[in-house]
Image (cartoon, rainbow, N blue to C red):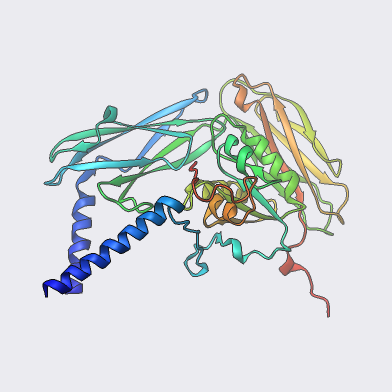
Amino acid sequence: MIKGISELVAILAISLGAAGTTYWLKGPPVRLFVCDPASLKPDEICLQQLSPATKVLWVDARHRKEWEESGVPDSALWNLDASENMQTFEADIAARILESPRVIVYCGDENCGLSRQVAERIRALQLGAEVSVLRGGWRALNEAGRTRSGGAMIKDSNPKS
Amino acid sequence: MKFAIGMWLVLAGLVQAAGLEFAELINEVNAASDATSVTADFNFTNKGDKPVTIAKADPTCSCIKVQISEGKLTYAPGESGVIRTSFEVGNFSGSVDKVVALYIDNDKPDHPSMQITVRVHIPVIVGMEPKTLKWELGGKAEPKTVQIRMAEGKPIHVVDVKSSSEAFSCELKTLEEGKKYDLVVTPKIMDVPSISVIRIQTDCEIVRYRVQQAFAVIPRPTPSATPSKP
């Protein structure tokens, strides 16, 4: 009995040592964002559900600085910062929605309510666009290499707006 | 056994969430027309029999700042506190609901056990209705109207109207000087999708209401509305 416990403790110690060494050498494990279409809310979409041929107008709901540094190329900015001009956002979206009537809003957090608020505002304009919220937000896009930082920040970044 | 553990966890969660009791969960505030920010206080008391810690208050919008009783986060049974929310009015108008999610004790990420709502009523000084005028592609080029109505008080005049697209013509009709205007918009071409941003300039003393905009749109037909080829 005692021998069995000793062996178990030895195995556990070796395993923990190996795991610790791996962590020390390689860093923490990369946990990629997984989007389950079955768990989506009615206005949400998973990145993998989009056909590559679909022309999308990406709308970044994060702060301006984050959008400039790591937004999706050619995306539009629309956040609710008091320092921003909503009319400029509206006009910018209106100018582009005709060519890209598929609009998807993302923000910095995986469950960011901000993108839903922005999506509601875009829908309220009634410009004939289909507006969705991206499940997984910026993280999903970044892991797919669709942002300006192109997946480089997977390990150490998960900005929140 | 599983049932018993499950029930215990559910009950434990309810007791924990019920610890903090708020005087009101929705606080309505009327903003002055020239206000740049408004504050709303939420008074609460720990009615439970254990100390409660507010681990996080997530405003879900950068337009809201939250302060909890000058930094005090843990409340003994019977102890009271105040959550002060400050809403930056920015370009918002009309009625706006902003939610603050409260994570109590060991709430899981994205599963706050409570939420409070600030409902701000911001006066509409220069109202434009509807905000968007729509025509069907290939339909009749009928004129449509945006009603421009000024709030009670000092007259506000429309001094300029500009359309971003030549595909629409705009005519401003004065119904009551400084009070009521109609903006009549007529598309010139109906067989091409188009959008125009129509901006009106007013002499409103409050800068943020000075320029307002509406939209005229002939949208592309949605894929489901397009007849499929045989």
Residue in the picture at 64% in, 53% down: A146
Q: Tell me what residue is drawn at x 22 percent, y 44 percent.
A: B20
Can residue B75 be seen here? The reply is: yes
**In this image, A155 relative to B158: left or right?**
left
Q: Residue A46's x, y, as percent?
A: 56, 62
Determine whether B142 is above or below B223 in the image.
Answer: above
Image location (x, y in percent) of residue B66: 37, 33
**Quarter of the rendering containing residue B161:** top right
Residue sitting at 24 percent across and 51 percent down? B17
The structure residue drawn at horizontal position 25% and vertical position 39%, both measured from the top left corner, is B23
Q: Is residue A27 visible?
A: no
Task: Give the image location of residue B184, x and y in percent.
Answer: 77, 40
Q: Is residue B150 above or below residue B56?
A: above
Percent from the top left, x then y, of residue A5?
16, 70
Instruction: Using the rendered view, name the quadrant where residue B73 is placed.
Output: top left
Count of numbered tags: 0
Q: Nearer the viewer, residue B84 or A37?
A: A37
**Foreground residue among B100 and A157:** A157
In depth, the one of B60 and B138 nearer the eye is B60
- Left or right of residue A72: residue A111: left
Q: In this orientation, which residue lies closer to the viewer: A149 or B62?
A: A149
B20 with respect to B198 (left or right): left
- Taking A99 as reference, is B185 above or below it? above
Q: Quadrant of the N terminus of chain A?
A: bottom left
